[in-house]
Image: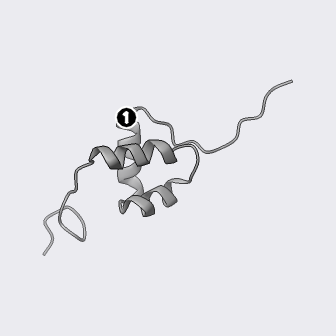
Amino acid sequence: MTDGWGKKGKRRGWDAKDIRELKSLAKKAPVRQIAGKLGRTEGAVRQKAMALGTSLDTRKRRRRK
């Protein structure tokens, strides 16, 4: 029986170390890699980044001539 929170059934809060790591990896690594490193789901990483106002866009932008 699950309690509605997925497989493990426990929610883990974000501590300052997790947030620092997320911010340092943002724009450098894909979300899948960040999630694996932090031990969280991709959705959790995306939601926290959005709440912090941090972009996870890793695409390089080309300058217009």
Residue 22 left/right relative to 2: right
Residue 65, above or below 2: above
Q: Position of residue 39 (x, y in %)?
A: 36, 63
Crowding at mark 1 (Cα within 10 Å: few <14, some 14-19, many 20+): few
Query: Which residue is rendered at x = 70% and y = 41% of the image?
Result: 60
Q: Position of residue 31 (x, y in %)?
A: 50, 53
Residue 41, above or below 25: below
Looking at the picture, tell me which residue is in the foreground, 1 or 56.
56
Quarter of the image where one finds residue 64 = top right
User: What kind of residue is marked 1?
Assistant: Leu
Q: Tell me the quarter of the image containing the N terminus.
A: bottom left
To which residue does mark 1 refer?
52
Farthest bottom residue? 1
Residue 45, above or below 4: above
Quarter of the image where one finds residue 10 = bottom left
Q: Position of residue 41 (x, y in %)?
A: 37, 59
Farthest front residue? 17
Query: Which residue is rendered at x = 15% and y = 71% of the image?
Result: 2
Farthest right residue? 65
> How is the rendered protein coloured?
one colour
